[in-house]
Amino acid sequence: MKFRYLPITETDKKEMLDKIGVSSTEELFSDIPEEVRLDRELNLKKPVSEFELKKELTEMASKNANLTEYRSFLGAGVYDHFIPSVVDHVISRQEFYTAYTPYQPELTQGELQAMFEFQTMVSVLTAMPIVNSSLYDGGTAVVEAVYLSVAQTKRKKVLISAAMHPEYRQLVETASNGKKLEIVEINYKDGLTDLKQLEQELDENTAAVLVQYPNFFGQIEPLEKINKLIRQQKEAMFVVSSNPLALGYLTPPGEFGADIVVGDTQVFGIPAQFGGPHCGYFATTQKLMRKVPGRFVGETVDRDGIRGFVLALQTREQHIRREKATSNITSNQALNALASSVAMSALGKNGVKEMAKLNMHKARYTKQKLEEANLPAAFNGSFFNEFVIKLSKPVSVVNDQLFEKGFIGGFDLGKAYPELENHMLVATTEIRSKEEIDVFVKEMRDING
């Protein structure tokens, strides 16, 4: 057998063309003007058998650096965490793996319940009463938070911390063009959002203030102080992008008065896998429930009083009149949301807290040992599992040499922050052992002289 699936034959093609009354594929596409058609063959390799293709792809894949062979100290939004084996077992089941949108609740109670449990667990972590059934990723969720804030306040000015993930900031900038929003970046000071500048920029035109918790440098933003400043402008929305694992230990944004809490659940059950796909979450207050992007799963009972689940309050234009739609999000990340739900369930409430504590302890051990190796931290505030250090050489040079020793080094902050040239963002998660950390520090000391 050369093919995994039976390919279409020339006889099959002829029968289909005869059925619709055309003589050739060219005639089928004759309505497309000649000038926009490709007038050459695609530059593709000749087709090969399934065995040959798998061999070629395996050889290509083996050239990639993977996290089973390399020890990673790279974070910056994508992390190397422990994933319970039960996660892959559950998400590989065909009733979950092939599910897309559960439009028929009587046939998809398992999928709907999985989404409902995801909403519930994120609600507990964020201390927010309303959570949707997921978005594409953390960046998408931040943009949707901006859109909701602008629609709710009827204002056009958005303040965003420079200590927020640079890719999230770029997404907000891009998304703001169509709505002609004014995006004002609030500088950071000592690794935290500059509260003096924030206070100066806050005015009656401000729709939202966006901060990250922990922020991109790993520092813990003072959410209580930020909330007090925002409440001086009563209608402005307080949006917090937050690592949900950190919320297993830190006080959740909901308890500080956040209006919207968003983030990415990659930290629970989703591999790094070259940066995606991930799973965004969107949590908010009951007041904003009917303006949340995406969809909710609600709990109900059937006519016999048996517990069941249904889709509820969908806000996209496919379901309601276009002019009343609050979002153009037309899907969610059900499979990855399920992976996160299974991971959180396997860990349990105490396990998530213990996992967060391990991240904090091991990151502090790494920071202490690097300081002893004459590689001090650039910022001295409270942090979760990431911190910034200053190197004596370009980060790219250091990372190349670390890679030769079997390590994936930290993020080169100079790429996103020119003023932080030769600064590395180091992440230490719960799966890094003391021995791995000690060897990493030794290599860092040797490379940096």
Image: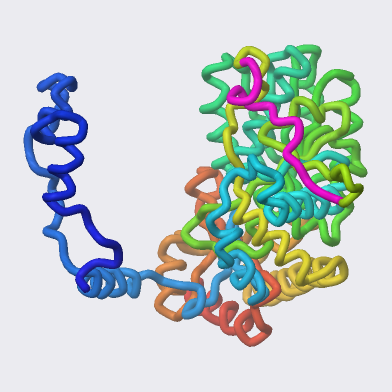
- Image coordinates of residue 293 in percent, x first then y, are 68, 32
Colouring convention used in this rendered image of the protein: rainbow
Res 146 quadrant in image: top right
Above or below residue 259? Residue 371 is below
Q: Nearer the viewer, residue 77 or 62?
A: 62
The residue that appears at 19% across and 69% down in the rendered structure is 49
Q: Nearer the viewer, residue 201 or 115?
A: 115
The magenta stretch is: 307-321
Above or below residue 240? Residue 316 is above
Whether residue 194 appears in this view of the structure is no
Relative to 123, 192 lies left or right: left
Does the stretch in magenta take in 314? yes
Q: Which residue of the protein is positioned furthest toward the bottom in this rendering?
A: 435
Which quarter of the rendering shows the N terminus? bottom left
- Image coordinates of residue 225 in percent, x first then y, are 89, 37
Whether residue 437 appears in this view of the structure is yes
The residue that appears at 85% across and 18% down in the rendered structure is 235
- Image coordinates of residue 240 in percent, x first then y, are 76, 40
